[in-house]
């Protein structure tokens, strides 16, 4: 949305193509306290502010899943869109846990679904980077069982209703009628009302076959340009050192301004 805002204000005819709610993973962040201009703001509120700005500028938004990019054509599951330049800003997706796709009480979004399990017992699969999701759940749920392959730093945990099982591997998920009932690990069995998966994120770029990548992260130069001259990329989908909202917005600004320069040649 940042890239679209800059392009529209530069009098470029821009289309914003999305596969989900505008804002992506912003909509799954409970609280943001490090974004300039806001002492604190929820992710969904920040996403809506951006969306409102996009709408006020009259930027066209369409929805569809991109399945390929070929010779200035963006091919979705709905249509094919021809364009001069493309900016890829598709971010990352949550890492999945095997054998959970058909289970109705497994969630990959703590802030979205925590209230469904108010005063109940839940489990959450985390690592040290995502342990705050367990703390968030502990304020809503009766009991939170933390499962992690890593050694969790327990000094970060103050809630009495959190149980931590480090160096833990899930062996079996037992279910009835697509509802998870029991989690079996190497040493324990847990009966739960729900399971949350919070293992971080990975790039969502497998379908981009002609673009150079490193471990599925898109490689760009200092102009945010890929190895294909008409394709740019920005945000969490690119290979870089720092993944933050502020750096994503900065990447998008650089990409948009360089697209404008290219169009003026």
Image: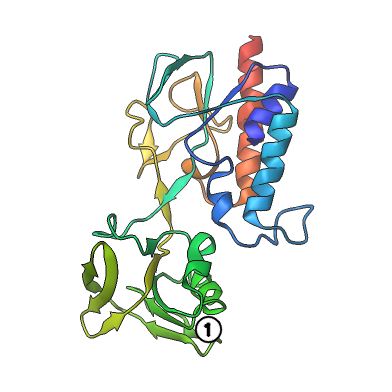
Q: Can residue 243 be seen in this view?
A: no
Category of crowding for the residue at label 1, using alpha-carbon neighbours closer than 10 angstroms: few (below 14), some (14–19), many (at least 20): some
Q: Where is residue 208, by image quadrant?
A: top left
| Of the pair 256 and 117, the residue shown nearer to us | 117
* 47 left or right of 79 in image: right
- Report which residue position mark 1 lands on: 157
Q: In this view, does 224 lie above or below 242?
A: above
Q: Quadrant of the N terminus?
A: top right
| Of the pair 17 and 209, the residue shown nearer to us | 17
Residue 176 spot, x, y in % from top left: 22, 68
Q: Which residue lies furthest to the front in this view?
A: 177
Q: Quadrant of the C terminus?
A: top right
Q: In this view, does 52 lie above or below 123?
A: above
Q: Which residue is at 45% across, 46% downward? A: 92
- Secondary structure state at the residue bearing disc 1: loop
Q: Where is residue 169, by image quadrant?
A: bottom left
Q: Which residue is at 69% across, 32% downward? A: 54
Residue 263 spot, x, y in % from top left: 62, 13
Q: Which residue is at 29% across, 55% downward? A: 101
Q: Is residue 57 above or below residue 234?
A: above
Residue 114 spot, x, y in % from top left: 50, 68
Q: Which residue lies furthest to the top in this view?
A: 265
């Amino acid at each position: 949305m940042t890239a679209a805002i800059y392009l529209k204000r530069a009098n470029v005819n821009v289309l914003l193509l999305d596969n989900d709610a505008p804002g992506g993973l912003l909509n799954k962040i409970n609280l943001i306290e490090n974004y300039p201009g806001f002492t604190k703001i929820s992710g969904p509120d920040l996403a809506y502010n951006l969306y409102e700005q996009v709408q006020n500028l009259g930027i066209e938004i369409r929805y569809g899943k991109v399945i390929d990019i070929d010779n200035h054509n963006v091919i979705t599951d709905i249509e094919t869109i021809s364009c001069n330049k493309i900016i890829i800003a598709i971010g990352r997706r949550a890492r999945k846990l095997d054998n959970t796709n058909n289970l109705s009480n497994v969630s990959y979004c703590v802030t979205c679904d925590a209230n469904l399990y108010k005063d109940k017992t839940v489990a959450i699969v985390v690592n040290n980077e995502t342990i705050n999701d367990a703390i968030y759940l502990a304020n809503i749920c009766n009991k939170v069982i933390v499962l992690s392959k890593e050694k969790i730093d327990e000094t970060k945990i103050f809630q009495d209703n959190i149980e931590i099982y480090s160096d833990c591997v899930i062996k079996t998920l037992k279910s009835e009628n697509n509802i998870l009932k029991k989690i079996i690990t190497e040493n324990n069995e847990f009966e739960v009302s729900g399971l949350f998966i919070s293992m971080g994120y990975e790039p969502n770029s497998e379908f981009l076959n002609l673009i150079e990548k490193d471990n599925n992260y898109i490689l760009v130069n200092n102009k945010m340009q890929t190895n294909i001259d008409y394709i740019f990329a920005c945000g969490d989908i690119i290979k870089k050192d720092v993944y933050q909202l502020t750096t994503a917005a900065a990447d998008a600004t650089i990409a948009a301004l360089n697209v404008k320069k290219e169009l003026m040649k």
